[in-house]
Amino acid sequence: MIMCLYTFLTGLVVGIIFALLKLPIPAPQALAGVLGIFGIWGGYELVNFLINRFG
């Protein structure tokens, strides 16, 4: 859980720096980015499940 907090705080600091420097954020559109992250996580979990189930 502490790693999630560190990750969030790091992202927050980077976002603040980008806003202060008036740079575009280095991320895709909000929904596309979130779906991409869930897709990566889902694929990882699916492979682990299949390996544990059939491997």
Image (cartoon, helix red, strand yellow):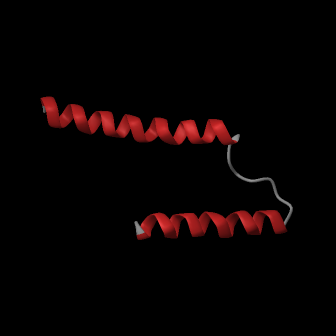
Q: Which of 40/34 is in front?
A: 34
In the rendered image, the vertical position of residue 9 relative to residue 28, given as above or below: below
Point out residue 7 in the picture as x, y percentages from the top left corner.
Answer: 52, 64
In the rendered image, the vertical position of residue 27 relative to residue 5, given as above or below: above
Left or right for 45, reference 31: left
Quarter containing the N terminus: bottom left
Point out residue 3 in the picture as x, y percentages from the top left corner.
Answer: 43, 67
Point out residue 41 in the picture as x, y percentages from the top left corner.
Answer: 42, 41
Q: Residue at x 15, y 32 (%)?
A: 53
In the rendered image, the vertical position of residue 50 relative to residue 21, given as above or below: above
Q: Residue at x 51, y 70 (%)?
A: 6
Q: Residue at x 68, y 66 (%)?
A: 14
Point out residue 39 in the picture as x, y percentages from the top left corner.
Answer: 47, 35
Left or right for 42, reference 27: left
Quarter containing the C terminus: top left
Left or right for 43, reference 52: right
Q: Residue at x 19, y 35 (%)?
A: 51
